[in-house]
Image: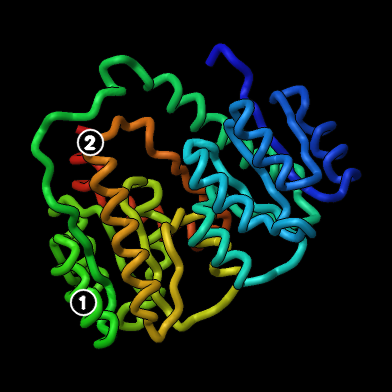
Amino acid sequence: MSQPIRVMFVDDEERILRSLALQFRRQYQVLTESNPLRALQRLQQEPVDIIISDQRMPQMNGSQLLAQVMERHPHTLRILLTGYSDLDAAVDALNSGGIFRYLTKPWDPQAMTETLRQAARLVEQQSALITPASSQASTQAHRQPSLLLLDSDPDTVRHTIELCRNCGIQLHQAHTLSEALELLNDQPLDILVSDIRLQEEDIRPLLMSLAQAHPRLLSIIVTPFQDTQVLLKLINQAQIFRYLPKPIRSGMYERAIRSAADKARDWQIQPRHQVHRAAEAPSQATEQSLVGNLLGRLGRLRQRLSA
């Protein structure tokens, strides 16, 4: 990439902005703004590759800022930085702001450095793929989006069947992890709807594996389980698309399904540089082992996607 990666930090504390600028000014072209409204104005005037916003700011919180950035500048990678564990803020940032990663304050310099490195690598890869040929929409016929449901909850099943019928989505359902792996290996799937557990099996290692094996698969988690640390892992290590509470709220669920279906259709006709997703590797040895095992069992999926 000929131009340096442009990173904007938004935080109402000037001291934090100075510290971040000092840490990263040698690797990136760093921009700072203490007012989120000015940050939006500046984005209108000059391109930014990555934006990192604090959550708690007086004029507008980080979730609201990143939601507007996603709407106006969808190719800018969005990262939320916050100093407190707030499930609502994390859910809002994911569902409305489509965040790439979530970091906590006080930030770990190494974690921040690695997150920015991965984001910058994505920006460079996507820029390198933009060519006159690839920037044109494909003229090939496109299949209808397909959805895999990993949840036996009757309410979820009923809502999903109805939405798939109304939205023109092909529905597949698995009742065990083994069934899910077979379908993932054999079927071209675009959307995954799942609880965190399926028949007493923990689905989180599968979600982490799929983020690496199939970054275009859009995972929607629908669960009564509320744990901020679990959600942060799912955002960073599973790159989940939406996180919704149970019991299902029909309007919220419909918006998530329609949004995923629209994105799946867009990705069928848009070049690969449109996909801004890359999962953080699991850090715990147990999770690394489980993910490695599942990646091996997803071998046919990986071969099909790399062909």
Report the residue at 34% width, 16% height from top: 131
Tally of numbered tags: 2
- Asked if residue 83 shows in the view, the reply is yes
Q: Is residue 144 above or below residue 167?
A: above
Amino acid bearing label 1: His
Q: Residue 175 has which mark? A: 1
Nearer-N-terminus badge (1/2):
1
| Image location of residue 276, percent across then percent down | 44, 39
Residue 208: x and y in percent read: 42, 57
- Depth check, mark 1 against mark 2: the one in front is 2
List x then y, in percent, for residue 265: 23, 46
Residue 141 lies in quadrant: top left
Query: How is colour applied across the structure in the image?
Result: rainbow
Q: Position of residue 8 (x, y in %)?
A: 69, 36
Q: Residue at x 55, y 67 (%)?
A: 91
| 296, 188: nearer the viewer | 188
Front residue of 161 and 173: 161
Q: Is residue 170 found left or right of 289 in the rendered image? A: left
In terms of depth relative to the viewer, which is nearer, 22 or 40? 40
User: In the orientation shown, which residue stands out farthest toward the right?
Assistant: 15
Q: In the displayed structure, does residue 3 sit left or right of residue 27?
A: left
Horizontal relation, residue 198 to residue 101: left or right: left
Label 2: element kind? helix
Identify the disc placed on residue 269: 2
Estimate how packed mark 1 is, as few (under 14), some (14 to 19) or many (20 or more) residues with alpha carbons within 10 Å: few
Q: Return the residue nearer the eye: 280 or 298.
A: 280
For the residue labelled by badge 1, is the local secondary structure a helix, a strand or a loop?
A: loop
Question: At 84% across and 31% down in the image, what residue appears?
Answer: 22
User: Which residue is drawn at the image coordinates 27% and 58% (left, top)?
Assistant: 191
Q: Is residue 201 visible?
A: no
* Screen quadrant of the C terminus: top left
Label 1 and label 2: CA atoms lie apart by 32 Å
